[in-house]
Amino acid sequence: MSYKYRYTNIPSVLQGDVPEWESRSYLSDRKGQCDFHHIFGQTKYNRKLSEQYGFWVWLTREEHMKLHGTPEGIQFGITLKQECQQIFELNHSREMWMRLFKKSYL
């Protein structure tokens, strides 16, 4: 079954088709109220790409805040981007990735 998520109806490529009411943090596996985190979210264009390709995860509010404000969080964000690029390149070319995202994380 496919769910409608907060911003998209495309499931997360990293967490699968998990509805918000059953969400668990991708980082800690904690269950409960989780935030929808766009892995590529710096611009409206990147957020739309994240939604289109399923590049998003559930994170607790605390983890989400740390992701945006600490060196460890920034590194975790890069790791998420690398995982998404690897998945994308299973079915698409690196050239297509570069046309869409403008930067390689691998």
Image (spheres, helix red, strand yellow):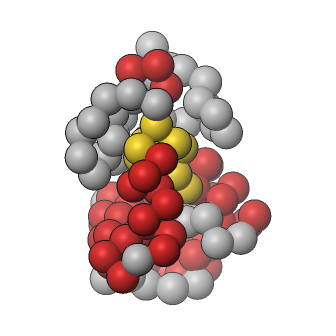
Q: Is residue 78 visible?
A: no
Q: Residue at x 51, y 85 (%)?
A: 103
Question: As displayed, is residue 31 above or below residue 2?
Answer: below
Q: Is residue 90 visible?
A: yes
Where's residue 6, x and y in %? Answer: 64, 34
Q: Residue at x 55, y 55 (%)?
A: 38
The number of callouts visible is 0
Residue found at the far front of this picture: 62
Q: Nearer the viewer, residue 22 or 99?
A: 22
Q: Residue at x 61, y 24 (%)?
A: 4
In the rendered image, the quadrant that contains the N terminus is top left
Question: As displayed, is residue 26 above or below residue 19?
Answer: below
Quadrant assignment, res 102: bottom right
Residue found at the far top of this picture: 1
Query: Left or right of 105: which side holds 55?
Result: right
Query: Left or right of 60: which side holds 102?
Result: right
In the rendered image, the quadrant that contains the C terminus is bottom left
Where's residue 49, x and y in %? Answer: 63, 59
Residue found at the far right of this picture: 44
Where's residue 24, x and y in %? Answer: 33, 33
